[in-house]
Image (tube, helix red, strand yellow):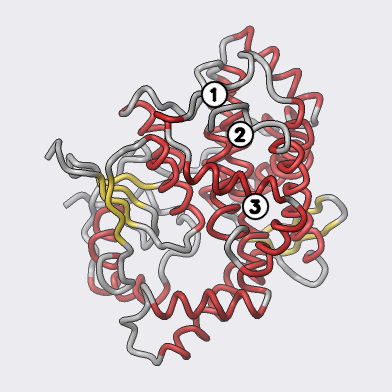
Amino acid sequence: MSGEPYTLYLFWISYFSGKLQAALRYKEIPHRCVEPKWGGALLHEVLDNTGLMKVPVLRTPAGDWLADSTPIIDWLDRAHPGSELIPADPLQGFFSRLVEDYADEWLWRPALHYRWSYPADAHALSRRFAETFLSEQPTPRWLTAALIRDRQRRIYVRGDGVTAATREHVESVYLRNLDWLQAIFERQPFLLGGRPSLADYGYFASMFRHFSLDPTPSLIMQSRAPAVFEWVARLWNAKASTTHGGWCVPGTLPDGWTPILRDVGTAYLPYLHANAVAFRDGRRHFEFAVQGAQYRRLPVVPYRVWCREQLQAAHAALPADARAVVDATLADVGALAPLLADGVIASKLYADTTPPLCRPRVVGRIERLRRWITGTHWQPATLAARTPR
């Protein structure tokens, strides 16, 4: 099987699918792409081997199944040396992970808002859903599209705190990030200099398949941040064998990172902390005030408790001299205190697996039917309880 390519299960309009596909392209790892049908390979192959109705997932030539784009990229760095995306320099490695996590998770809300709150975007994308991986559903495609619009708005817009009171703040997250990235990409091709890093791919998740392609945010990007629009295409076309630039001087970060890191410290890490405390206390929802906006009934997301654990673990693993410099930088942008507040709050995910590796599970008829109806909304707290076949 060593001569076979990887198999990437993806949705062509999926946030994290584009991120992982671009990383595979940069690393020049042979792979084939499969867009599974909802009631076909997603319900059977993917669910049976990962426990989730989610993509992207990657099947290796050896037959292992990998899930979660960030741990997959980490795994690919080790399995395919020579095209690493995570810098070996401790300071750059840590901040690449921090910014990647911020971009992955904090831009999720505006990406879903722009796609499903604006009628032109919602109708175009729901029809795309209905014509592709939901095309085998028993309902007429116009009805499938309408049901998709209702589901996505209920779960990922209204269900994720987007209201008339918070909408301006949600959109400001996108607009301010465009401005910060525009300033960086006017001076250099990638976030850390002349070569892509993990931080680039964190941003790419939302900036490619959502913001640069969905009608409303794409027009905003083209007019407000053309250098970001150019970077999207540049990163999509980047290959390790033809990228000859390097990262900036070890032990340093580009000047343009400061506004991003300040937002990490004043908005994202406080959100992660509030989410983790609510999870620890057994709550399903919590309130969160940030940058003049008051979010009510935000859903507790166990996966983001795990994200915070991983950032804390990366911080704890820093050599003492590098940690001192990292801590000084974090403190300057208000990020050190929320990163460490209340210590490690355990997510209880992945008790018997090591991400990104998955274990197969037996899926009964009732659970399979439930998954076919509901899919997988957020990463569930029961993810660790997988039963091997």
What crowding class fits label 2: few (fewer than 14 Cα within 10 Å), some (14-19), or many (20 or more)? many
Label 2, label 1: how far apart the Cα atoms are: 10 Å
| Element at label 3 | loop
Label 1, label 3: how far apart the Cα atoms are: 28 Å
In-front residue for pair 110/280? 110
Q: Residue at point 39% right, 39% down?
A: 72
Residue that lies at the very extreme toward the left in this rendered image: 1
Residue 17: image location, x then y, percent: 44, 54
Quadrant where the N terminus sits is top left
Q: Residue at point 78% right, 49% down?
A: 176
Residue picked out by circle 1: 245
Question: Which mark is first along the chain, 3 or 1?
Answer: 3
Please tell me the numbered disc located at residue 107.
3
Label 2, label 3: how far apart the Cα atoms are: 19 Å
Question: Which mark is first along the chain, 3 or 2?
Answer: 3
Drawn side of residue 194 relative to residue 297, left or right: left
Residue that lies at the very extreme toward the top in this rendered image: 321
Question: Looking at the picture, which amino acid does disc 1 mark?
Answer: Gly
Q: Residue at point 24% right, 59% down?
A: 48
| Element at label 1 | loop
Residue that lies at the very extreme toward the right in this rendered image: 292
Q: Residue at point 56% right, 17% down?
A: 90
Question: Looking at the picture, which amino acid does disc 3 mark?
Answer: Leu
Please tell me the numbered disc located at residue 190.
2
| Residue 221 image-quadrant placement | bottom right
